[in-house]
Amino acid sequence: MTDRAMITDPDSFFAQGCGRCDRFATADCSTRLWLTGLLTLRRIALDAGLTEVAKWGHPVYMHADRNIAIMGAFRGDYRLTIFNAALMQDPEGLLEKQGPNTRHPDCFRFTDNAAPAALEPVIRAYLAEAMSYADQGLLPPKEPTEVELPPELVEALDADPDLSEAFAALTPGRQKSWALHLNDAKTSATRLARIGKGRAKILAGKGATER
């Protein structure tokens, strides 16, 4: 796999992909499979008044300086994931857990390009709920964990199922090494950069100090 940079403009995601792998900007990119559905989700999010930016190689939708949702495309499905999902009421029972490291159901998972349009009123309601929590400054209560992970890593794991699965498979010592490595950074930008650089090592089952 070529070591390439993740996209930094959300428009690039819809035109070329996330930039994580060699399928970037090719007809085989996962975004090509689900483009109609992804564009529908984009329209719904923007119509809701969310601000679109690019983080972790994916479009992220923000409100009141908080991450509200992130979009992702994979070989078997595409997703709209809600941040701080422990706050969500999920009255329709539609949210699913992304992977073994996810504590709460947090994502809409689609396998049909027409599905987001059919669910538009529900998606709008869920986004409005998440935005209301941001307006109130509400955050879910901290849950006990053996390793104190920085919020940037928690969000990256929620946004990247492959990374989440690989991190969950690490030994407690290796998980702790990443927590220490990231918490040692003084700024969020540095932590995000370290996560991006360290992704391949985590996928390879390595700790932060291993070569």
Image: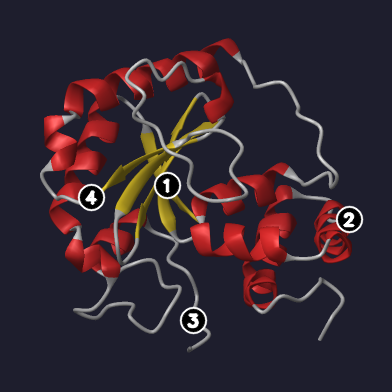
Name the residue beneath numbered marker 4.
Answer: 38
Dot 4 amino acid type: Leu
Task: Measure the alpha-carbon separation of dots 4 and 3.
Answer: 23 Å
Which of labels 2 and 4 is toward the front?
4
The tag earlier along the polypeptide, 4 or 3, is 3
Q: Look at the picture and state if 45 lies above or below 78.
A: above
Q: SS of the residue at dot 4?
A: helix
The tag earlier along the polypeptide, 2 or 4, is 4
Measured as percent of width and height from the top left, residue 26 is found at 24, 81
Task: Measure the alpha-carbon separation of dots 2 and 3.
Answer: 26 Å
Residue drawn at (39%, 66%), measured in percent from left and top? 18
Q: Quadrant of residue 14?
A: bottom left
Q: SS of the residue at dot 2?
A: loop
Q: Are marks 1 and 2 in contact (CB under 8 Å)?
A: no
Q: Are marks 2 and 4 in contact (CB under 8 Å)?
A: no
Q: Quadrant of residue 127?
A: top left
Structure colour scheme: secondary structure
Dot 3 amino acid type: Arg
Judging depth in this view, the residue of 98 and 32 nearest the camera is 98
Check disc 3: other Cα within 10 Å, few if <14, some if 14-19, many if 20+: few
Check disc 1: other Cα within 10 Å, few if <14, some if 14-19, many if 20+: some
The tag earlier along the polypeptide, 4 or 1, is 4
Name the residue beneath numbered marker 3.
Answer: 4
Name the residue beneath numbered marker 2.
Answer: 184
Residue 53's disc number: 1
Residue drawn at (81%, 32%), measured in percent from left and top? 144
Measured as percent of width and height from the top left, residue 161 is found at 50, 57
Residue drawn at (23%, 50%), measured in percent from left and top? 38
Q: SS of the residue at dot 3?
A: loop
